[in-house]
Amino acid sequence: MITRYAHSPEDIDHYNTDQLRREFLMEKIFNPGDVLLTYTYNDRMIFGGVTPVSQPLEIKLDQQLGVDYFLQRREMGFINIGGKGSVTIDGNKEAIEPHDGYYIGMGVNHVIFESADEANPAKFYVVSTPAHKTYPNKKLAFKDAIAMPMGDQEHMNKRTIYKYIDASSMDTCQLQMGYTVLEPGNSWNTMPAHTHARRMETYLYIEFGSEDTRVSHFLGTPNNTKHIWLEPEQAVVNPSYSIHCGVGTTNYSFIWAMCGENQTYDDMDAIDMHELR
């Protein structure tokens, strides 16, 4: 696990491209047979990839977090963007299909990830946030996700937001998580832009429409924006003061995860398009 620190808007105003990428971009999420995680001081979120191949994998963090086991004081969610797999939660094993998710409450001792096929391994994108109460574990099948069609073709942002971990439909301390899919011929996400000062967010960009697709992600304050170019399966941290939107050379998808003081999904501060700089 690597650590990334929190920064003020004045700090990042002086960052060049390399510094910006080093502080806000997680370039490698999935590595076969490995667990790759980032700990960000922004609301102390941990996020990254678990990619089991021939052997099961388990996230083992204790001394780094000052606890006896990883989820002693945390909750966790994941979405599988790879092949079929399974998860065993304190001895209870369940199959996980592509695009299925899961919420795991505080206090779970062991979470073991496996792939069904070494040639097409599962890719578990995991996000964990501090928790104060134990809520029930819950499998979140893709077919049961809350689907919210958004945008239109005229503005090139026709997409569907699939909400997995959402306080309006289940109990969670602070973690929210979902999956957004842009339709072919659409390239903009989360535009008009907004901020939500009461929580931070991470974006994992996936499922690019072609091999040569790239996405430019925008962050920073509305009047002083920055951008980062992303390859497939890379993630970006967005502080609570930051906008978070992107545009691709073709369509793509992304997984978003949020945590902070407010769990209301539409608690956001819209930015007038004329204010963007």
Image: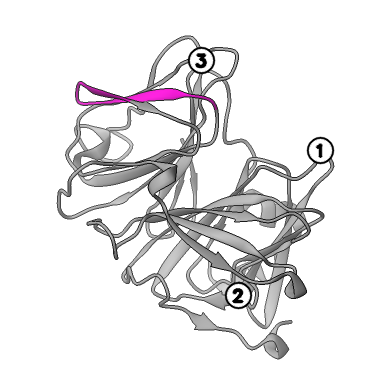
Gap between marks 3 and 2 measured at Cα: 43 Å
Which of 159 and 166 lies nearest the eye of the viewer?
159
Q: To which quarter of the image does residue 183 belong?
A: bottom right
CB atoms of marks 3 and 2 within 8 Å: no
Q: Is residue 157 above or below residue 210?
A: below
| Secondary element at image label 3 | loop
Horizontal side of 170 relative to 125 (left or right) equals: left
Gap between marks 3 and 1 measured at Cα: 24 Å
The amino acid marked with disc number 2 is Glu
Q: Circle 1 is placed at which residue position? A: 211
**Which segment did they paint magenta?**
83-94
The amino acid marked with disc number 3 is Val
Magenta region, main secondary structure: strand
Gap between marks 1 and 2 measured at Cα: 36 Å
Q: Which numbered dot is residue 53?
A: 3
Which of 70 and 105 lies nearest the eye of the viewer?
105
**Residue closest to the far top:** 54
CB atoms of marks 3 and 1 within 8 Å: no
Q: Which numbered dot is residue 10?
A: 2
Horizontal side of 105 relative to 10 (left or right) equals: left
Which of 163 and 222 lies nearest the eye of the viewer?
163
| Secondary element at image label 1 | loop
Residue visible at 42% across and 75% down in the picture: 266
Q: Is residue 245 visible?
A: yes
